[in-house]
């Protein structure tokens, strides 16, 4: 199988797995169902992902990559750093309010508790990638003349931390924690921008 064909097969299996995980949950999704929907064979799936845990990891990494694409789009179309961060905050809040996203987060938390190596691989890759996307924006804003009050890497981690906490809290509490309305979200972002030197 050529590299290009293998890449297409990989993408097809990731898309199929994501759809099935959201439709029926990770535990109830059989790898044979993923292959049936995504194409290929079980042998190819195991070669590419090593099993269900690797497939889940790939699905979540793809979702983080999509978030990075949206972040770049926000930065290209928003008139100010505050508006970029507000759009990003809304995107992250939407994920925290999405029952499917919360369910996947719950599975990730459980998998991380059961398998520390999985936790290290997953969070080391996804959170680091998301933070790097945001850090590049802070660097750009600094180069544009904003007097940041801390290093771009620290500001990126702090901003993401506010919303990753919400998503994890929703997952752990089964959606019982109310995180506030749009006005509360805007206040959070305004406070952050003021504290970060992005007014």
Image (spheres, grey):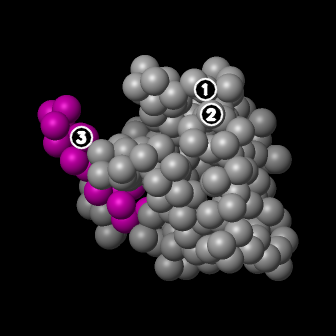
Q: Quadrant of residue 35?
A: bottom left
Of the pair 85 and 32, the residue shown nearer to us = 85
The 10 Å Cα crowd at callout 2, few under 14, some 14 to 19, many 20 or more, is: few
Q: CA distance from mark 1 to mark 2?
A: 5 Å
Mark positioned earlier in the residue sequence (1 or 2): 1
76 sits to left or right of 175: left
Q: Is residue 174 magenta?
A: no
Query: Mark 2 against mark 3, which lies toward the viewer?
Result: 2
User: What residue is disc 2 on?
Assistant: 197
User: Which residue is found at the position 29% from the left and 56% from the top?
Assistant: 12
Q: Disc 1 vs disc 2: Cβ atoms closer than 8 Å?
A: yes
**167 over 64 or under it: above or below:** below
- Which mark is drawn over residue 198? none
- Mark found first going from the N terminus, 2 or 3: 3
Q: Secondary structure at mark 3?
A: helix
| 56 vs 157: above or below | below
Quadrant assignment, res 198: top right
Most foreground residue, 30 or 123: 123
Q: Position of residue 15 (x, y in %)?
A: 36, 61
Q: Residue at x 32, y 69 (%)?
A: 37
**Which secondary structure dominates the residues rendered in magenta?**
helix
Element class at badge 1: loop
- Residue 1 at x, y = what percent? 18, 37
Location of residue 125 with respect to 76 vertically, above or below: above
Can residue 103 be seen by looking at this rendering?
Answer: no
Magenta residues span: 1-17
Residue name at image x 44 percent, y 62 percent: 17
Mark 3–mark 1 distance (CA, rounded to whole Å): 44 Å
Q: Looking at the image, is 187 positioned above or below residue 5?
A: below
**Circle 1 is placed at which residue position?**
148
């Amino acid at each position: 199988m050529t590299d290009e064909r293998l890449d297409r097969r990989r993408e097809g299996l990731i898309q199929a797995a994501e759809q099935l995980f959201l439709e029926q949950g990770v535990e109830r999704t059989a790898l044979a169902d993923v292959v049936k929907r995504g194409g290929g064979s079980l042998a190819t799936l195991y070669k590419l992902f090593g099993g269900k845990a690797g497939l889940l990891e790939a699905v979540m990494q793809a979702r983080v990559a999509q978030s990075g694409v949206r972040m770049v789009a926000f930065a290209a179309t928003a008139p100010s750093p505050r508006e970029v961060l507000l759009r990003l905050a809304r995107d992250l809040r939407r994920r925290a309010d999405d029952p499917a996203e919360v369910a996947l987060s719950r599975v990730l938390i459980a998998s991380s508790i059961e398998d520390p190596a999985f936790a290290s691989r997953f969070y080391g890759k996804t959170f680091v990638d998301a933070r790097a996307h945001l850090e590049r924006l802070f660097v750009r804003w600094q180069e544009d003349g904003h007097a940041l009050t801390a290093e771009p890497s620290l500001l990126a981690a702090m901003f993401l931390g506010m919303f990753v906490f919400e998503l994890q809290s929703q997952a752990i509490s089964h959606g019982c924690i109310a995180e506030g309305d749009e006005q509360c979200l805007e206040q959070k972002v305004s406070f952050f921008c003021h504290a970060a030197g992005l007014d």
